[in-house]
Amino acid sequence: MDDDEGELPEIEYLTVAAVTLLPHPGDVSGPPCMVRRRRLPERLWRQVRPRPPSDCCVYHQGDWRELSAAAIRLVAAAKAAGLTNVDAISEFVREVRSKELDARGDHDTLPAVGVDALVSMGLAIQPGGGRPQRYYEGRHRVIAMIDAGVHRTIVLKSKPNPAWVE
Ligand SMILES: [Zn+2]
């Protein structure tokens, strides 16, 4: 190990992904409503017959169609404003989302933290890491999104950093 604080070999970035094409999270141990595997026919069926939000667990409580749509729209706005760094984008999204929720008098917690969790480093849905889990973050949210028939959402990915020299 060294303690070099220089450039990292990878750059992380937020991008839009089709939920049906995301890997199925493996081996989710609970809550019970999350454990069952959702195969492709069911995923496609849910795209036209979404399961509405329910109180069975914190994941299924979220209106992931609305949350994902807001995250996609606000990340696009942040990028249009010239932001590329994930922390800068998530800060932008948090501020704009907060103003929008205030403007419509929505003071529930989930609409704010749900979007924040989709766009923040360390919280965003992050495919990768191989089997059995197939995600670094967001396995339960992906299952909730499959059930809710969400078409597209925001995920965190990484790519080689051209500025990084070993
Ligand atoms: Zn549930």
Image (cartoon, grey):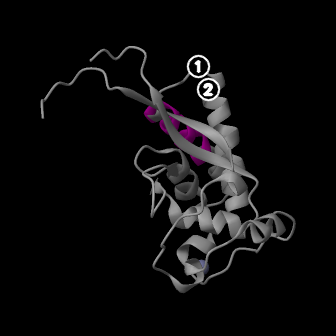
Residue contact at pointers 2 and 1, CB within 8 angstroms? yes
Q: Which mark is residue 116?
A: none
Label 1's element?
loop
Question: Picture coordinates of residue 148 (x, y %)?
Answer: 73, 67
Left or right position of 24 against 136:
right
Quadrant hosting residue 24? bottom right
Separation (CA) of disc 2 from disc 1: 5 Å
| Residue for badge 2 | 79
| Magenta stretch, main secondary structure class | helix
Three-letter amino acid code at the position of disc 2: Lys
The residue that appears at 17% across and 24% down in the rendered structure is 4
Asked whether the viewer can see residue 103, the reply is: no
Front position in the image: 159 or 154: 159
| Residue for badge 1 | 82
The residue that appears at 68% across and 42% down in the rendered structure is 72
Left or right position of 166 against 18:
left
CB at disc 1 and ligand 1 closer than 8 Å: no
> Is residue 73 positioned above or below 145 on the image?
above
10 Å crowding of disc 2: few (<14), some (14-19), many (20+): some
Label 2's element?
helix
Question: Picture coordinates of residue 153 (x, y %)?
Answer: 66, 49
In what quadrant of the picture does the N terminus appear?
top left
> Is residue 7 positioned above or below 48 on the image?
above
Magenta segment includes 67: no
Q: Which residues, given as a range, are shown in magenta?
A: 87-98
> Is residue 20 positioned above or below 160 on the image?
below
Question: Picture coordinates of residue 95 (x, y %)?
Answer: 54, 40
10 Å crowding of disc 1: few (<14), some (14-19), many (20+): few
In what quadrant of the picture does the C terminus appear?
top left
Quadrant hosting residue 55? bottom right
Three-letter amino acid code at the position of disc 1: Gly
Asked whether the viewer can see residue 56, the reply is: yes
